[in-house]
Image: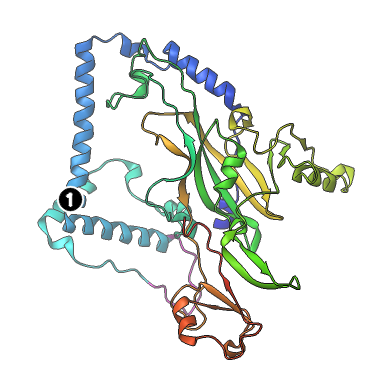
Amino acid sequence: MSRGFDSSFGPPSQPINVADFLQQANSAVLSGSFTNASWEQLTPEHRNVVEAEINESISDLKSSLEQVWDNPVLSAHVLRQHESTVASVRGQADAPVPKGRKRKRHVAPEGSESFPEALQLQEKLDAVNLRCWRLTVESALCMRAAKNSDYNALDAPKKTGTGVLQILDHGDVGATRSSTPDSLRSPSPDAISYPNAVISLTVYNRISYLPGFLTRSSQHAVLSTQTLGDLLRVLPCASSNMPMEELDAEEDVSGYNVTNQTGDHVGCLFCIEDLIYGDGRETADYAEKLIAHIQKSPEDKRPQIKKASTSVSETTFNALTLRIHQPYWILHQGNCEHFFVIDQIRLAHASDPPSGYPLMLHLTPTVQDLCRACGKVPAVHSIVGDMRLGESPCLLCAPCWRTMGSSKNDEGVMVVPLVIPFINQ
């Protein structure tokens, strides 16, 4: 069921022309449409009082949270109570246990409950009157165990391109670090337009053993002035990191060159809103090949798509009309497919990183096969044709392969480096 939820998108938004969005948003910024009329009617003294109250409220919340998490006894107590509550909710919501079996009950570990400070904290939590504060049995419908795609291999946004964010002097709108909400601020007389929009998108791949379902691969932030090709070049994909084959005099594969990988996307296409953006090649454009293939289908089953007038390397996001939460299709490197979904289209902000776009915001950790010899370390070599291993190919880690040493009869034995996309970038 969770796989089905992850592969469902939508409902999509209305079509958004990125260029029109930039123009309308900039006009609203310049005209002060984002400001609040009631805020404008307040005197400067009253505004200062409101800002001081906001600052004090935020500071109180922050300090109370920091006091709990900085105290090992209190933080451990909160975590234990949360885990116990979640286990209790799941236990009540589970299906009846078959006859003859006993349900495994979760027993909350004892520890911090005897500390006076933990008891005082618990009394404060119990005194909260919000109905949504506590988890109910129905909460189990929204719970699931963490999956690999929920984890992020990055500890900070990663710069993967050369795009530069142009932030012009727009006064106090969106640039100030004051606690006053943006909707209450007054526009600066010298405010000018934003030259870029920032587009956040998520990339999904098919699950190899469940091709009808998708899993999240990565998340990126691109500038509206960048092209589809700029996005494609930074997608983490094993097909784009395959080592090049080395041929002998008889044109047979004799090995692989891991330093020279197929990073160039010679053949590719994007399908966005029934338009196919090809790679722009004169002889074998991917868009033309796809349309020719579709023409072989019965007329009543043909998708209504057509080739765009620009290629992937020529099409910027400013020239596109996109829908949020609508999946779009990418095909490259032969038959390698990806799907991407637009999460957000917004104006640039002064707090955004100034360069390095497209930025990679999320990268799902790579699940690597373990070494077949030790079963403890991820494999980095695929050994082909070695009779000592009992199977071909055989996945081994570097220490195990060094320990075995080369075979006496190494003719026909090939050591192929495993592809681990983005591991060394």
Q: Position of residue 39 (x, y in %)?
A: 31, 14
Mark 1 belongs to which amino acid? Answer: Leu
When the figure is inspected, residue 161 is found, relative to residue 115, above or below; the finding is above
**Residue at image coords 60%, 53%:** 263
When the figure is inspected, residue 230 is found, relative to residue 371, above or below; the finding is above
Inspect this view and state whether residue 131 appears: yes
When the figure is inspected, residue 207 is found, relative to residue 42, above or below; the finding is below
Q: Verify whether residue 345 appears in magenta.
A: no
Q: Position of residue 31 (x, y in %)?
A: 44, 11
376 lies left or right of 243? left
**Residue at image coords 58%, 27%:** 18
233 lies left or right of 89? right
Element under disc 1: helix
Circle 1 is placed at which residue position?
121
Instruction: Write down the quadrant of residue 109 in the picture.
Output: bottom left
Q: Extreme left residue here?
A: 116
**Residue at image coords 37%, 15%:** 36
Instruction: Write down the quadrant of residue 348 in the picture.
Output: top left
* Magenta residues (range): 93-104
Inspect this view and state whether residue 1 appears: no
Q: Quadrant of the N terminus?
A: bottom right
108 lies left or right of 366? left
When the figure is inspected, residue 8 is found, relative to residue 77, above or below; the finding is above
Q: Verify whether residue 101 appears in magenta.
A: yes
Q: Position of residue 76 (x, y in %)?
A: 22, 59
At label 1, counting other C-alpha atoms closer than 10 Å, the crowd grade (few under 14, some 14-19, many 20 or more) is some
Choose between 333 and 370: the one closer to the eye. Answer: 333
**Residue at image coords 54%, 56%:** 2
SS majority, magenta: loop
Q: Position of residue 349 (x, y in %)?
A: 40, 29
